[in-house]
Image: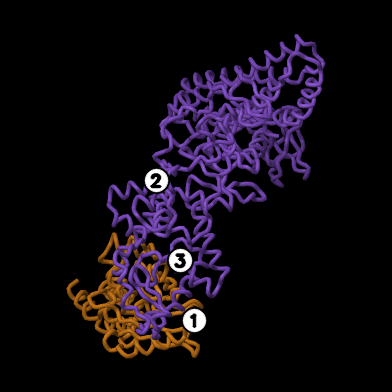
Chain colours: A purple, B orange
Amino acid sequence: MEGEEDYGFSEEEDYYYADDGDSHDGLADNDDSALQWAPPKGSTTKVITKESLLAAQREDLRRVMELLSLKEHHARTLLIHYRWDVEKLLAVLVEKGKSCLFTEAGVTVVENVDDDAPLSSSSTITCDICIEDASADTATRMECGHCFCNNCWTEHFIIKINEGQSRRIQCMAHRCSAICDEAIVRNLVSRRHPNLAEKFDRFLLESYIEDNKMVKWCPSIPHCGKAIRVEEDEFCEVECSCGLQFCFSCLSEAHSPCSCLMWERWSKKCHDESETVNWITVHTKPCPKCYKPVEKNGGCNLVSCICGQSFCWVCGGATGRDHTWSRIAGHSCGRYKEDREKQTERAKRDLYRYMHYHNRFKAHTDSFKLESKLKESILDKVSVAEERELRLKDFSWVTNGLNRLFRSRRVLSYSYPFAFYMFGEEFFKDEMTDEEREIKKNLFEDQQQQLESNVEKLSMSLEEPFQQFSQDKVMDIRMRVINLSVTIDTLCQKMYECIESDLLGSLHLGTHHIAPYKSKGIERASELSSCWNTKLGSTDEYLPSGGTSEHDRPSGSGSSDDSGCSYRKRAKKEGGGFFDLNLPAEIVDRN
Amino acid sequence: MIDFARVQKELQECSRDMEASGIKVTPKSDNLARLTGTIPGPISSPYEGGTFQIDITLPDGYPFEPPKMQFATKVWHPNISSQSGAICLDILKDQWSPALTLKTALLSVQALLSAPEPDDPQDAVVAQQYLRDHQTFVGTARYWTETFAKTSSLGVEEKVQKLVEMGFPEALARSALESVGGDENLALEKLCSG
């Protein structure tokens, strides 16, 4: 059969998609000079706007163009096929060779430009699609060598673009998997539908976001129009320049130290009625007549439903109304129903367990909200204090303390759903014995409680009316806030270490990844410079004059800073915010 | 809009070499958007001797979008629905190319009849049978060809009747016919030997 060899095609694409990719797409850290106080590595997370979208993919394109001496549209076709994973692309190159790499992606590089020769302007060809004759100037030969009339090409392109296939428009010839030259597509389509040609360009450009696992649209609603690019680790939390903080991996709210899977289950559990249903099972029985759930609010075992039906609370069977305290006339149900009893017990236990964790989770989330409101009034106190003639002029410890409070509250809140699943039966029932579970649970809870008590202390200290205090008392409270902040930071780190090495790290299932602890808070993505030439079409000549090539970048260095726990001292930024050299570097004071 | 000029040319081309290919395409009505294709069952396959009718509907984007094809004749094949006649063939879906024609597409369908792909089935029941009990599959496919794809030869009922008249019990005659794919001579042989 003719079609067999092409069946595997889409599977290949999935394979590349599913594969891991340590994509070093080598960006130029142009804007870091403005942020001198940041650690040398700077914010590797970048915001990509409509304007900088081309600049963002330029580095990848250029790398592939240079390595394989290709034109831009070929490099783009390759990168789209390999989902912008340059490392993967290079691996295929090394493993299977250049021609295989090109064939799989549908790239045809014309070695000999004279191929166009037979198509002189005087000759005519017969287009195999419309079966009409066409003069050479109304026909186009694609790089794969197939020639059809322009009308048919245009029709083909329009249908493919409207089908959402812009990124992989193949040649019209049967079994030819060559991808059409984007310039030809653009040129022919714009003659008939300029709007559609623009759409085509946008689809091509947005492939960098849509087909790239290191780049994702910001999930803000209404959408801010930006995308975020991360480096190296996709399990992280980011902040878009629109202010939204989110988990890059699952795009929901930032939930570390919960894994994405845990968070998904937890939010579902909190939202739907499953727990209500549990309560109903434990505390009610259905009326044997109208089947409504009936709650027993005291009295003997003869219950009557609002529909008028009486029934026995012990067995749920319908009865008459005639009874004494210990007997219902004509009814006996001494038999023990073990299954039912067990089921009820279990449901009750699960419900209480859930309530325990949920109450604490909610308490900390509520505190977080309250404290966010408090921020205003605390900052007011700072300005009052600054007015006073005190020896201490620097009140950055207040802001730093507040930020530390917010961050640790967050960790604390999400540590409860984490514990709910970590020590529950849903995910890890067979992963550890009951004794192991108990030991680990105690270990974790000790850390959690330590963190909890320090966080509460910090919260209390910050709420004190220090603006009215005497000089010495202010110094006292300052020391307390600074010390508590440092302790809390260390405790958070320890908790994450415990999770990574003793809890999740010891499991066989590798499905739970958590975003690492960032002492400085969720990293705000920095704007990507868009000063490069953003005009499409004139880009084939683009060759940079040295500067930010991959080899010039410090690679490998600074990876130890990734945990964000750097205690590096830094220069005080002119005219900006509050700084305290005793504390870990703060990114920015977010309003 | 459908390129009717091309469809017209395709029809001419097709009727020109109908003798050689055995493939026929005729419009159902005047507008050329609905047609009927006819293919002979491939030689040395259970479909040999049958004539299969295929309903063809051309979408607006034809030839840039694939034609919709469906068997009108009932057929027992892993890649063709025994209920609806829907065909599972790549060139009728994402592997369609505007350079293909109705004739080449029908030729591919014919090729599919002789080379089923049970790993990518349209009809799971048939595919299971094809893989696990090939003998029965061939028998059923032949029986269906005999019953539904041969208009000229005798109907099954008539063959049963004939065997009954020869003195065989009706149920036995029917099952014998079914097991040999409807060939009355083979059925007779089987009945005599068994």
* Placement of A183 over or under A399, stated as above or below: below
Which residue of the protein is positioned furthest toward the left in this rendering? B193
Which residue of the protein is positioned furthest toward the top in this rendering? A472
User: Circle 3 sits on which residue?
Assistant: A183
**Quick one: B67 or A524, which is closer to the camera?**
A524
Res A564 seen here? yes
Q: Position of residue A382 (x, y in %)?
A: 77, 23
> Tag 3 or tag 2, which sits nearer the N-term?
2
> Do callouts 2 and 3 point to residues on the same chain?
yes
Q: Position of residue A554 (x, y in %)?
A: 43, 34
User: Circle 1 sits on which residue?
Assistant: B2
**Quick one: A236 or A284, which is closer to the camera?**
A236
Which amino acid type is marked by label 3?
A: Ala
Nearer the observer, disc 1 or disc 3?
3
> Do callouts 1 and 2 point to residues on the same chain?
no
Which amino acid type is marked by label 1?
A: Ile
In the picture, the quarter occupied by the C terminus of chain A is: top right
